[in-house]
């Protein structure tokens, strides 16, 4: 089991020799995307250095989770797109032949890997899902979702080895948050107790990382963001909860004999 962060929610997962790319975002690619989803750091993986993949797993059809470059890559390579109903509908519309649409509660076997679609609560994407990917170990990928007891209940049937979870989100008047921040992520880790919890969704400018301390993802406060993540990691470790901040482009394998539970 090995994971490599490209950036934001895009992670290359090698589980049992099958390679998945989560919520692939290679942009922004044009002015509209730069306005709608300004990015803090460019992706580590581009079309010139991305390794072969068997499938993309796509939580929902937003441009910072499934963009036109990802669609072009899937069409060119013939990899399978496994995702929410709207994401798969868009993939089919753009000429991708190999697709599997899932809604929460569905389960498939893909090349010997079990993929369970997990409930997600995203107020701006009603078809959003997360994924529990399992073969001699389980990786949970949240996509964008608010903290929800339904997620906890769904994951209670697994021992989650690695949880890749949103840790910064938008906030709207009246509607509130559209996903998880660091406080929610701590609560998630306390309830699910993965061996390792990894915060993601840290490259879209303006998202709230720690609303209580007034910390957002911004170009001018990288050190403040890094400090908040270090503080979060320290609190996690004080609670005997495994925490890992991924460095883009650096493959990481969990410690097999970790006694963190």
Image: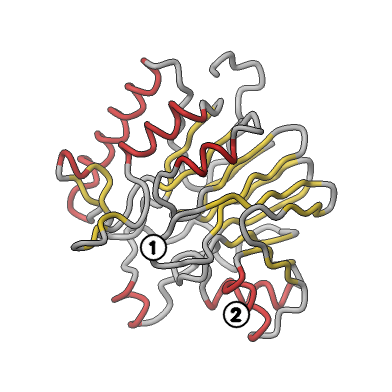
| Front residue of 224 and 173 | 173
Task: Identify the mark at residue 123; answer none if there is no mark.
Answer: 1
At 42% from the left edge and 59% from the top edge, which residue is drawn?
A: 122
At 52% from the left edge and 62% from the top edge, which residue is drawn?
A: 128
Q: Quadrant of the C terminus?
A: top right
Q: From the viewer's perspective, is residue 49 above or below residue 94?
A: above
At 24% from the left edge and 42% from the top edge, which residue is drawn?
A: 210
Left or right of residue 142: residue 161: right
Q: From the viewer's perspective, is residue 258 above or below residue 106?
A: above
Q: How far is mark 2 from mark 1, CA to CA?
A: 20 Å
Left or right of residue 159: residue 148: left
Task: Identify the mark at residue 83; answer none if there is no mark.
Answer: none
**Which comes before the other along the chain, label 2 or label 1?**
2
The residue at the far left in this view is 214
In percent of width and height, residue 111 lies at 84, 52
Crowd around label 1: few <14 · some 14–19 · many ≥20 (10 Å):
some
In percent of width and height, residue 166 lies at 42, 48
Q: Coloured how?
A: secondary structure
Q: Secondary structure at mark 2?
A: helix
Q: Quadrant of residue 203?
A: bottom left
Crowd around label 2: few <14 · some 14–19 · many ≥20 (10 Å):
some
Q: Secondary structure at mark 1?
A: loop
In percent of width and height, residue 37 lies at 34, 69
Q: From the viewer's perspective, is residue 72 above or below residue 1?
A: below
| Front residue of 146 and 39 | 146
Task: Tell me the mark number nearer the camera, choosing from 2 and 1.
Answer: 1
Left or right of residue 194: residue 7: left
Q: Determine which residue is flagged by label 2.
A: 90
The residue at the far right in this view is 112
Q: Quadrant of the N terminus?
A: top right
In percent of width and height, residue 189 lies at 45, 30
């Amino acid at each position: 089991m090995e994971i490599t962060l490209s950036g934001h929610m895009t992670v290359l997962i090698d589980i049992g020799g099958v390679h998945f790319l989560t919520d692939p975002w290679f942009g922004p690619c044009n002015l509209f995307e730069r306005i709608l989803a300004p990015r803090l750091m460019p992706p580590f993986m581009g079309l010139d250095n991305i390794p072969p993949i068997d499938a993309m797993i796509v939580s929902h059809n937003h441009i910072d989770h499934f963009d036109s470059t990802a669609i072009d890559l899937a069409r060119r390579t013939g990899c399978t797109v496994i995702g929410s109903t709207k994401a798969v509908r868009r993939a089919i519309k753009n000429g991708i032949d190999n697709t599997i649409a899932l809604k929460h509660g569905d389960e498939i076997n893909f090349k010997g890997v079990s993929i369970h679609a997990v409930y997600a609560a995203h107020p701006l994407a009603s078809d959003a899902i997360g994924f529990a990917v399992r073969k001699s170990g389980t990786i949970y990928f949240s996509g964008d979702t608010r903290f929800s007891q339904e997620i906890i209940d769904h994951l209670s049937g697994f021992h989650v080895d690695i949880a890749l979870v949103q840790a910064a989100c938008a906030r709207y008047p009246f509607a509130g948050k559209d996903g998880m921040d660091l406080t929610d992520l701590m609560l998630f880790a306390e309830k699910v107790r993965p061996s390792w919890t990894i915060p993601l969704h840290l490259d879209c400018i303006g998202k709230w990382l720690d609303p209580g301390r007034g910390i957002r993802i911004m170009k001018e406060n990288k050190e403040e963001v890094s400090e908040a993540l270090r503080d979060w990691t320290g609190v996690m470790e004080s609670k005997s909860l495994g925490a890992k901040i991924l460095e883009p482009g650096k493959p990481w394998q969990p410690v097999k004999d970790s006694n963190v539970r």
